[in-house]
Amino acid sequence: MSDIVTSIPPPTWVISDTHFGHMQILTYCPWRRTWADGIVQHDEQIIAAWNSCVRPNDWVLHLGDMALGDRGRLYEIRQQLCGRIILVHGNHDRSIAKMKREGFDEVVSAVTFTINDRTYIGRHNPGAFSMREAQTSHLLLHGHSHGNPPDINIHPSIRAKLKDCSLDALTSKGPVAIASVIA
């Protein structure tokens, strides 16, 4: 996987770690059991929450780990989701080329964007940010951690700018307005 940081238009929404079809996610992330009894209900709840706020031309930044499970199901899920999706490749996602074939508008290893003269960088894994990225950005948006504290081995300058955008950290079933995340 390339480590090129791709410049993107400012997204309207952000989310990470939806884990569509991941049978064990309800075990690993107990908060999800408060609104889903099984993976079918889990996926349906996220799709409904997503489509209740995202409009067809909105840009959604998904910071990785979109889905795990049945290969044919990912295309079905993507077709049900409103908006234009920029997917930052996560450790549970298939290859960048395969994810593009599933219908994502962009699939990249990392992103950068600017809102109100502030630069933001997004990656899946918070441990992948560099010191230079921490120095040049206002916030470092990521997923992967599911609301757990960042690894203590991540440099304090990087940790100070981290913002976990997983649905577990944001306690939201669907994407969250980027404006509220970066405020």
Image (cartoon, rainbow, N blue to C red):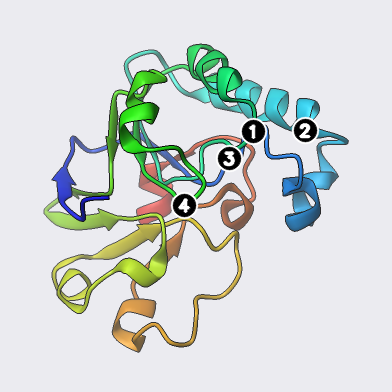
Q: Nearer the viewer, mark 1 or mark 2?
A: 1
Determine if residue 52 is in view: no
Q: Residues within 10 Å of mark 2 (few under 14, many from 20)?
A: some
Amino acid under label 4?
Answer: Asn
Left or right, 18 with respect to 38, comes to: left
Q: CA distance from mark 1 to mark 3?
A: 12 Å
Image point (32%, 36%), residue name = 96
Tell me whether the residue at label 1 lies in contact with that at label 2, contact meaning CB atoms closer than 8 angstroms: yes
First in sequence: mark 2 vs mark 4: 2
In the picture, which quadrant includes the C terminus?
A: bottom left
The residue singled out by tag 3 in the image is 18
Q: Amino acid at mark 1?
A: Gly
What residue would you read off at disc 4? 91
> What is the number of the mark on residue 69?
1
Mark closest to the chain's N terminus, 3 or 2: 3
Crowding at dot 3, Cα within 10 Å, few <14 / some 14-19 / many 20+, comes out as many
Secondary structure, mark 3, is loop
Res 173 → quadrant: top right
Residue beneath the point at 59% across and 57% down: 169
Q: Which callout, 4 or 3, points to the residue nearer the camera? A: 4
Farthest residue, direction right: 37
